[in-house]
């Protein structure tokens, strides 16, 4: 009886897992199929039919070149790089002083960062837009970069959490050797924060790469389009050419897939840690 | 030459506190607090976003939002996403629980279930346009299973469009909840399971008396995030339908009012209402949680 129950329980478990995996994969797999079909083939076959020729890259070249995806990748890379370096530096700096020093206004500062998490970014876009406009940053990559830096609160929490586990004794022994606070931060704290930095890079990176409304609202200029906005533009001219749109979709997903497969371990840890606090 | 390391530690301390906090604080004030303050200010005006003239009109914008059914009806759309949130959390919790125990191909299932939450929002929007379009993935699948009679205009029928879109949102965000739950469950000491095994507990008992209490806080945190996410739903409906056929959410409407119709004053009032709702929900959640713990 007990054994029967266990077998039944585990069949339900695997059935649920397989169904879950099927639902997660099917929408993506059919897009991959469509992206490798010729126009005539796409029109004649059902979405569930695999392509005849698995090496038909014509749609990919068309999507990549006509869709200006290279510009998209270049802009995304530039914004990602600057934002991530900036977020890592500012986040770890503020976390360092908040964790290591006692000073007036410290709890106020911490509270200010905490309270800001209550404000959903998307609600304040209308007036954030006016600020960006006044700073004359509209239609420059700096609009997105500043916004990605300015709203970074998760990073501060992750760094604070990690700093707790770095012994203060390390700072003290460095001070006995005459190291300045700046040296301590740069030579001791920052290298020890490496796991936290990887976590922040991943979380920030994913958010920035996938963000749509910031570049859409603040950088409408074609030469400034990022992957999200470049892909969104396919909606117009390629509205019915699903084989080309599909290739564009796959091109946009590939970097995420590569990053995911190579950083799996860190990503799992990072997301769990990032959301606990 | 004046070197930083030659300063006394107390002077260094002061310098470093100022130097390290000035940029993050400036960014926080400029891009988190100033917009909120301005938003309240604009919400009492008739400003159009570019002219120099700005007249204060008192509560006129707010009265319009609450009396004109056109503005208020979009909240009904949020309910779909709100309900979807619970489905999403339930699924995430189920998968996280079964995958925290011995399972074949554990890493494969983990990866597949989680990957969608890392994907580009625009790509997801397009993928599901293809999924729901007439003769698209879903219709073909239903026909193949002999369920052809259930085929509908998934994105053309105002009665079901929001269900389709909320379904997409579940697909997109379930993996994130899942991975967070998985992390929380894996931090439970295995001794607890062993002890309960000896006491003859089955999986359901273990779930109810060990897992659920241990991840309660994360569950509540996720719930708060999910609820404010439901109220501020934007990406998926905007990319997929542009808000047509009754799928317009509050945020789409707010941005349209501000940027398409140049009514920044009115849009700000809408954003204030949205912000207050999100804060109220969050505070209510926290109060309820605290009440429960006492």
Image (spheres, coloured by chain):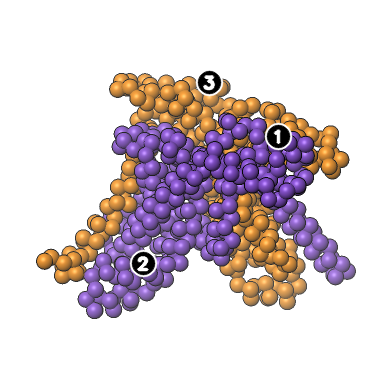
Chain colours: A purple, B orange
The residues tagged by marks 2 and 3 sit, at their Cα atoms, a distance apart of 55 Å
> Is residue B48 positioned above or below A105 on the image?
above
The residue at which mark 3 appears reads as B68
Q: Which mark is residue B133?
A: 1
Point out residue A75 in the picture as x, y percentages from the top left corner: 44, 45
Q: Disc 3 vs disc 1: which is toward the camera? A: 1
Chain under disc 3: B
The residues tagged by marks 1 and 2 sit, at their Cα atoms, a distance apart of 50 Å
**Residue B3 visible in the snapshot:** yes
The residues tagged by marks 3 and 1 sit, at their Cα atoms, a distance apart of 33 Å
The residue at which mark 2 appears reads as A190
> Is residue A11 positioned above or below A58 on the image?
below
Q: Disc 1 vs disc 2: which is toward the camera? A: 1
**Dots 1 and 2 on the same chain:** no
Return the disc, 3 or 1, that comes first in the chain's sequence.
Answer: 3
Name the one closer to the observer, B259 or A234.
A234
Q: Residues within 10 Å of mark 1 (few under 14, many from 20)?
A: some
Point out residue A86 in the picture as x, y percentages from the top left corner: 36, 54
Side of B52 where A226 appears, left or right = right
Chain under disc 1: B
- Give me the residue at 30% from left, 74% from top: A171
Q: Quadrant of residue B219?
A: bottom right
């Amino acid at each position: 009886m007990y054994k029967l129950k266990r077998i039944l329980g585990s069949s339900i478990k695997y059935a649920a897992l397989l169904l879950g995996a099927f639902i997660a994969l099917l929408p993506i797999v059919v897009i991959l199929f469509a992206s490798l079909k010729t126009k005539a083939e796409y029109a004649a076959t059902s979405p569930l039919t695999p392509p005849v020729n698995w090496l038909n890259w014509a749609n990919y070249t068309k999507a990549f070149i006509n869709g200006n995806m290279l510009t998209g990748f270049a802009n995304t890379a530039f914004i990602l790089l600057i934002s991530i370096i900036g977020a890592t530096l500012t986040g770890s700096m503020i976390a360092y002083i908040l964790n290591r020093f006692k000073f007036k206004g410290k709890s106020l500062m911490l509270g200010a960062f905490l309270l800001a998490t209550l404000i959903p970014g998307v609600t304040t876009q209308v007036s954030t837009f006016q600020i960006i406009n006044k700073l004359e940053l509209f239609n420059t990559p700096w609009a997105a970069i500043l916004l990605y830096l300015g709203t970074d609160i998760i990073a501060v929490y992750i760094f604070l959490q990690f700093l707790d586990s770095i012994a203060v004794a390390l700072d003290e022994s460095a001070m006995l050797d005459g190291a300045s606070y700046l040296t301590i931060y740069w030579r001791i704290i920052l290298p020890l924060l490496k796991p936290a930095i990887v976590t922040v890079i991943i979380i920030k990176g994913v958010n920035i790469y996938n963000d749509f409304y910031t570049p859409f609202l603040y950088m409408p200029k074609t030469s400034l389009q990022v992957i999200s906005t470049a892909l969104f533009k396919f909606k117009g001219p390629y509205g019915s050419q699903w084989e080309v749109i599909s290739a564009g979709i796959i091109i946009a997903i590939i970097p995420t897939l590569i990053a995911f497969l190579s950083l799996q371990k860190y990503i799992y840890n990072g997301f769990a840690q990032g959301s606990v606090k | 030459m004046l070197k930083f390391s030659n300063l006394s530690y107390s002077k260094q301390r002061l310098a470093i506190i100022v130097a390290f906090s000035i940029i993050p604080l400036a960014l926080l004030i400029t891009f988190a607090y100033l917009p909120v303050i301005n938003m309240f200010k604009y919400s009492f005006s008739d400003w159009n976003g570019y002219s120099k003239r700005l007249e204060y009109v008192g509560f006129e914008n707010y009265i319009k939002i609450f009396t004109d059914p056109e503005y208020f009806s979009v909240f009904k759309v949020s309910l779909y996403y709100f309900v979807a949130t619970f489905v999403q959390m339930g699924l995430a919790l189920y998968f996280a629980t079964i995958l925290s125990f011995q399972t074949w191909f554990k890493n494969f299932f983990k990866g597949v279930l989680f990957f969608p939450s890392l994907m580009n929002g625009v790509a997801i929007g397009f993928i599901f346009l293809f999924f729901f379009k007439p003769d698209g993935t879903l219709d073909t699948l239903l026909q193949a299973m002999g369920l052809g009679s259930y085929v509908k205009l998934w994105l053309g029928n105002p009665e079901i469009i929001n269900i389709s879109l909320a379904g997409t949102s579940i697909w997109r965000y379930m993996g994130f909840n899942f991975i967070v739950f998985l992390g929380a469950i894996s931090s439970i000491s295995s001794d607890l399971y062993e002890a309960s095994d000896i006491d003859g507990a089955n999986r359901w008992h273990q779930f109810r008396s060990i897992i659920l209490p241990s991840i309660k806080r994360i569950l509540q945190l996720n719930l708060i995030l999910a609820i404010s996410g439901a109220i501020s739903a934007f990406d998926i409906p905007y990319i997929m339908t542009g808000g047509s056929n009754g799928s317009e959410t509050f945020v789409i409407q707010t941005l349209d009012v501000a940027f398409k119709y140049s009514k920044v004053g009115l849009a700000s009032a809408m954003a204030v209402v949205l912000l207050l709702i999100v804060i109220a929900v969050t505070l209510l959640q926290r109060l309820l949680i605290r009440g429960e713990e006492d």
